[in-house]
Image: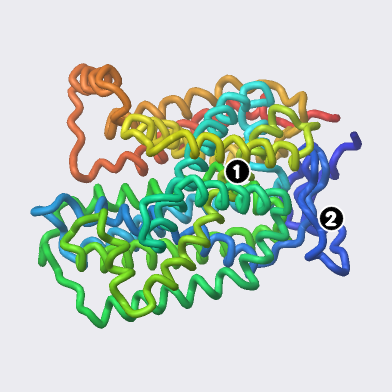
Amino acid sequence: MPPASSSSSSGAPSSGDFPESPASTAVLERPERVEAPLVLDTEPPRTLRFRDHFALWMNLGVSLIGFSTAATVLGAKGSEMSLAAAVTAILVGTAVGTAMLGVAALIGARTGAPAMATLRGLFGTRLSYLPTVLNIVQCIGWGVFELLTIAAGAQTVAHTDGYRWLFVLLAGALTTALTIWPLGSIAVLRRFVAGAVAVAMVYLTVQLGRQGVPDPGAGNWHGFLGATDAMIAVSISFVPLAADYTRHSRTPRSAFWGSFSGYTIAQVWCYVLGLMALLQSDGDPNRIFDSFLGVWAGWLFLLVLVLRETDQSFANVYSTAMSVQNLLPKVDRRVLSGGIGVLITVLALRIDRFTDTYTNFLGLIGSVFVPLLAVLAVDYFLGAGRHGWNLSADAPSRWLMLLPWLLGFAVYQLIAPTQVADWWTDFWASAREALHFTPQQWTSASLFAFLVPALVTWALTPLAHRTGRRTAL
């Protein structure tokens, strides 16, 4: 394979097998007909503009899960925050989290590599397999969860408790089809789905707003930082997926601003609308969709949002395939996408619902990507990445970079241990006692788990420079 050129039009260094310059890839006269590469080491077509990124991330920012989890922002019943505090937490947390998402999107646009393949530059190829496997597990888990959510939403619209298997099959089939033609699917989202979703959101917002929104905790800001931290975590959940799509960006600028603006607007809107529906359903998260169905023609607009939810399952399945390609770079992505789509459909048919333990386990895996992004960003912009990362199949292992990542994970769990098992929480409780550490309201797990590994990575930059330097191919 020939080496990439030593520089790009944006001034950033090249990265092994994945050319960084958007100008280095020919733009065809009919770019909408170009599809994503079938194997890992093929140059990605650079066809996505700002409007494509905006539409994709706007759709991903709206979710049925987001509506129902608005209760986590408001707080426990009887001790709810004020509406102003909850909305502010949504705004601040989303902006901070989505800025982190934008950084991951920017790196993908510059390197031209999928998300897990960029970690070859950070850790080396073999060590990159560890976060890759974790991402595969979480993406499959969330893909199954999304199919169950779509089926539940369809049952709500149809006013039935039956036919779950049918809705799961339909959602699984549509999801798999979208992943076979990912760039074409993004074009459909931009041309048709984004407009329909915007109309549905405007209609439901206006209708619920006309009914008035009660303020259960007027003046109460207790729990604000915890709610902000939760919103940061929601936004960061897409960090290990971002580069899978922005690698096709025409410019790094459009990738960053398209993802940041589209996702920020959509998630803020989604959670605020969820708060409105929640407060009109006596604070019961299980009755949020009843608020939507209670307005005239609400079922129609809820149906639009249910059908749109397939873009969430699409993102999880396609990114699973991209992650697997970091392990098996020569396998056709269509085969991987098809097989993974069938897998999550079968799992969704056999699982009635997710247990709290498994949902928390997915949250545990997700917490590894907050510090991972910090290490990735600092090393790329301030460390070895300035001189060019080696993203080839023989990229040497950089064991030193595991240290700040693991330290950041420990900081996250020390502040907010994931409730996966009693022994896990007991371990971190004992660690707190040994360190004489008591989390305060201002100790944000997401922010501290980002800042600590970022500073440690920066401090280790002189030592890590040699192992991160690009080797000749």
Number of the label disc, if any, that sits on residue 317? 1
**In the image, residue 172 above or below residue 331:** below
Q: Secondary structure at mark 2?
A: loop
Percent from the top left, x then y, of residue 26? 87, 59
Side of 335 relative to 319 (left or right): right
Quarter of the view holding residue 272: bottom left
Side of 304 relative to 420 (left or right): right
- Residue type at mark 1? Val
- Residue type at mark 2? Thr
Quarter of the view holding residue 50: bottom right
Scheme of image coloration: rainbow
Residue under numbered circle 2: 25
Given residues 56 and 121, the one toward you in this image is 56
Mark 2, Cα crowd under 10 Å, few <14 / some 14-19 / many 20+, is some
Q: Residue at x 26, y 54 (%)?
A: 286
Q: Residue at x 41, y 78 (%)?
A: 202
Split into 4 quadrants, where in the image is the C terminus? Answer: top right
Given residues 95 and 275, the one toward you in this image is 275
Percent from the top left, x then y, of residue 395? 73, 26
Percent from the top left, x then y, of residue 177? 68, 51
Q: Secondary structure at mark 1?
A: helix
Given residues 8 and 248, the one toward you in this image is 248
Q: Report if residue 393 is visible in the image.
A: yes
Q: Residue at x 44, y 32 (%)?
A: 365
Split into 4 quadrants, where in the image is the N terminus? Answer: top right
Side of 385 relative to 439 (left or right): right
Q: Report if residue 236 is visible in the image.
A: no
Q: CA separation, marks 2 and 1?
A: 26 Å
Mark found first going from the N terminus, 2 or 1: 2
Mark 1, Cα crowd under 10 Å, few <14 / some 14-19 / many 20+, is many
Q: Residue at x 48, y 74 (%)?
A: 198
